Image (spheres, helix red, strand yellow):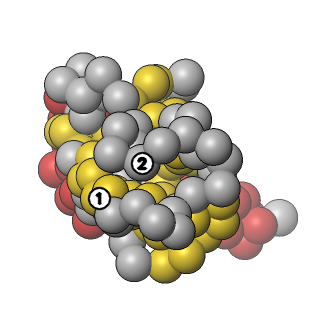
């Protein structure tokens, strides 16, 4: 019985020390919906990969900017980069609750970042894990 108690105590201790605020409450990825405004037939490329047409949803890493390209026949390619921002509140909470270990985990996994919805009106925050990115394609006539 003592052996199982020790094993349970070690597992509990590891689970507490190897996670942090950002990883628990935001994760290293977020769900993003990319909308080609008024262009349902526009091909959407994210970080160079074709992901669909018109509106697409996927999981994207928090620690890298999101580069979106819209391509439609007869129109020039539209490229927009959505930058990320540091999650200051997450950093402070990780520092207070988990210390250096929590900060290292958040920085290492990318959980310390989020899409910069405050500086870019094209990004709508639905929750800590869900965002909508609207890409306007003004040089291409709507279809």
Of residue 109 and residue 119, the one placed in the foreground of this image is 119
Question: Is 61 left, or right, of 88 in this rendering?
Answer: right
Relative to 74, say whether 36 is above or below.
above
Residue position marked by numbered label 2 in the rendering? 140
Badge 1: few (under 14), some or many (20 or more) residues near its Cα, within 10 Å? some
Quarter of the N terminus within the rendering: bottom right
> How many numbered discs?
2
Tell me where residue 51 appears, x and y as whole percent. Answer: 60, 69
Residue position marked by numbered label 1 in the rendering? 79
Q: Which of marks 2 and 1 is in front?
A: 2
Q: Is mark 2 on a helix, strand or loop?
A: loop
Q: Can residue 61 be seen in this view?
A: no
Question: Is 98 left, or right, of 51 in this rendering?
Answer: left
Tell me where residue 109 appears, x and y as whole percent. Answer: 35, 63
Disc 2/disc 1 C-alpha distance (Å)? 13 Å
Badge 2: few (under 14), some or many (20 or more) residues near its Cα, within 10 Å? some
């Amino acid at each position: 019985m003592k052996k199982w108690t020790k094993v349970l105590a070690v597992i509990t201790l590891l689970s507490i020390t190897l996670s942090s605020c950002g990883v628990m409450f935001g994760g290293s990825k977020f769900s993003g919906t990319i909308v080609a405004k008024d262009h349902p037939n526009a091909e959407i490329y994210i970080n160079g990969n074709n992901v669909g047409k018109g509106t697409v949803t996927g999981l994207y890493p928090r620690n890298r900017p999101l580069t979106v390209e819209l391509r439609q026949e007869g129109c020039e390619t539209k490229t927009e980069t959505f930058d990320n921002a540091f999650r200051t509140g997450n950093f402070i909470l990780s520092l207070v609750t988990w210390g250096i270990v929590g900060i290292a985990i958040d920085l290492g996994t990318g959980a310390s970042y989020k899409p910069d919805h405050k500086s870019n009106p094209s990004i709508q925050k639905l929750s800590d894990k869900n965002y909508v990115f609207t890409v306007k394609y003004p040089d291409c006539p709507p279809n």
